[in-house]
Image: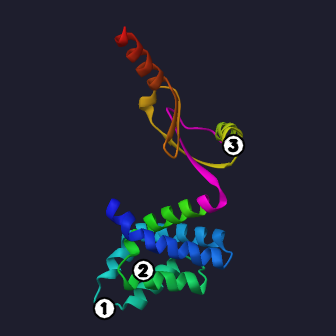
Amino acid sequence: MAESLTIARPYAEAAFKLARDLNDLTGWSDALERLTAVAQASAPLDLIGNPNLSIDQVAGVVADAAGQLTPQQANFVKVLAQNERLSVLPEIAQMYRQLRHQHEQVLDAEVTSAYPVSEQQAADIRGVLEAKYGKKVEITTRVDPELIGGVSIRIGDEVIDASVRGKLAQLATALTAH
C-alpha cells in the first residue's frame, strides 16, 4: 500500500494542479471516481499485458468504460496506461480527494459505529463537527460491531471515542490503576 501511494502521489498532484488550473475540481473528482471503478474491475487490468492491444487501445477501453471524459482526462488515462499505472487509480483518486479537501479546507471524518448510521444521524454528526472545527466536514461511515454501541470518529490524527468499547477500556484502565 505504501508503495502504491508513493507511485500515485505525482499523478494525483499533477491531476489536481491541472484540475485547479482548469477550474474543474469537481469534474476531475467525478472522473477519477469513475476511472477507479473501472480500474478495480479485473478486465482492464487483464488488457494491459495483452500483446494484441496497443497502449492507446487499452487507454481507450478504460476511458470509454469510465464514461464522458474531457480531452485532458482521457490524456491522463493514456499517460497512466503508458506508464503501467492504471492499477493505482484508486490511490490516485484518494490522494486527489485529500488535495482537493485541503485546498477547499474540508475535513474528512471517518465515523465508525456498531450499527449503520442513518442519513439524519450522519447530518447531526456533521453539524456538530462543523461547529466544533469551524470548517466543512465530509463524513464516511463504516460499521464495526465490536464497538458494541456508540461511535468512534477519526479526523486526521484525532480520534473521538464515544463507543461502549472505548468507555469499557477506560473503566478497566481506571480500575487497574488503583
Q: CA distance from mark 3 to mark 1?
A: 53 Å
Colour mode of the rendering: rainbow
Q: The disc labelled 3 sits on which kind of residue?
A: Glu
Q: Is residue 24 left or right of residue 73?
A: right
Q: Which quadrant, please, contains the C terminus?
A: top left
Q: The disc labelled 2 sits on which kind of residue?
A: Leu
For image coordinates 55% across by 81% down, the residue present is 73
Q: CA distance from mark 3 to mark 2?
A: 37 Å
Q: Circle 2 sits in a helix, a strand or a loop, which is it?
A: helix
For image coordinates 43% across by 64% down, the residue present is 91
Asked if disc 1 and disc 2 are in contact, CB closer than 8 Å, the reply is no
For image coordinates 60% across by 79% down, the residue present is 68
For image coordinates 64% across by 40% down, the residue present is 122
**Outermost front residue:** 178
Q: Quick one: 176 or 152, which is closer to the camera?
A: 176
Query: Mark 3 — residue?
Result: 130
**Residue 159 coordinates in the image, percent (x, y):** 50, 37
Q: What residue range appears in magenta?
A: 101-119
